[in-house]
Image: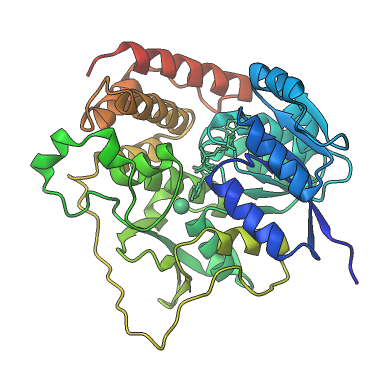
Amino acid sequence: MTTPKKVVLLGATGSIGSSTLRVLRAHSDRLQLVGVAAQSRHNELAAICREFDVSHAVLQDEKAYLRALQAGHFPATTQLSSGTEALTELATLAEADIVLVAVVGVAGLRPTLAAIEAGKDIALANKELLVLGGAHVIKAAKRKGVRLLPTDSEHNAIFQCLQGYPSEQVDKLILTASGGQFRDTPEKELAVVTPEMATKHPNWSMGPKITVDSATMANKGLELIEAHWLFGLEPDHLEVVIHTQSLVHSFVQFIDGSILAQVSPPDMTFAIQHCLLFPERAPSVTPSIDFHKAFSLDFSPPEYAKYPCLQLAYNALRIGDAAPAIFNAANEVAVERFLAKEISYLDIPKLIEYSLTQIVSPLSPSLDQLFQIDTETRDVAQAHNP
Ligand code: NAD
Ligand code: MG
């Protein structure tokens, strides 16, 4: 029997985190959870540590950490710590083989770079960190020879389709998009969309921020940028197609016109399991598609007028340097402000566009410059009333 792969899970209490726990439960003979991190939900994190007998845990939020110490509900065998430094230490844990990065936002960037430097394989669910620091992450991963396994479903699909083919044979990557919850809503009705309406997705069950991003297709925009970094293709070779059933997770078109796709139900456990067990395969935790029942697949080009965030993401990718980072930070603030009912749904792209025109991007920005631009953009997007 082979020894189980040792897994660190950053973002254990979130949507990706809980799908990951389902995979770990089903494959406890192959995968062992050795480290977990969460922002503040200490009760949930303690329960995970008890169930999986986890040796190291981090609560990023200091207050939550103090409450957890008071409550005494973590097992005595779990070493609990708090803070940014602790998150980086967890990501570089000596015994870990692979780090699954499922925290939200750019907070995941430094721990991921540290994990790469420590020679860990990375399963990457977090897309924002690649949008901000893609150049740095890809360079470090190549230099250290670590695997960067894409966990976002579209990128995982592309990664699976690319196995065995040299990059010169690839012409295009075609990312599928559900079109979000308002794909059939007339454009003029989008002005009255509320946060409650925007946080319900027709096919996927996800965190609130990414669900709003699916509606605006800012999510697909972030994924185009993510695909650029992961697979090295330029914007003219990256396309988006609306596919309402979310069964085909993306396509690769080769130079001879042949197209390969990866197909599975809209459930993140497929991509997560693929990454954690790679290059092995094992039975899935949820049933796959049943061809004994009839179903159809639809594809249509996106209406860019309805999804201005998608066009803005293409523009940001073409501009390059820090423009994707500005797009990402402005979008994050815009979504937060929309969820707090400070701005309307249609203000989200306006705030992004405004931020892209206000911030000056240096050429080939360093990591520190990127974080600085991230902060500057947030200030601009917070202060502006579109
Ligand atoms: P979520 O909000 O449900 O969960 C986020 C998790 O990260 C929580 O456990 C939270 O406690 C933790 N966290 C947040 N900030 C942290 C910090 N600074 N330090 C430590 N822990 C922190 O989010 P999610 O939907 O699971 O998404 C996670 C990431 O995966 C995002 O980047 C998202 O874009 C990406 N993603 C999600 C899905 C999905 O189906 N949910 C699909 C593809 C990609
Ligand atoms: Mg995705």
**Does 382 sit left or right of 278 as displayed?**
left
Residue at point 24%, 14% (across, down): 385
- Is 82 above or below relative to 259? above
**Does 270 sit left or right of 176 as displayed?**
right
Numbered-mark total: 0
Task: Say which of 139 and 272 sits in front.
Answer: 272
- Confirm whether residue 311 shows in the render: no
Quarter of the image with the C terminus in it: top left
- Tell me the quarter of the picture where residue 215 sits: top left
Q: Quadrant of ligand 1?
A: top right
Q: Position of residue 367 (x, y in %)?
A: 62, 25
**Does 13 sit left or right of 347 as displayed?**
right
- Confirm whether residue 229 shows in the render: yes
Q: Position of residue 158 (x, y in %)?
A: 52, 63
Residue at point 89%, 68% (across, down): 2
Q: Position of residue 156 (x, y in %)?
A: 55, 60
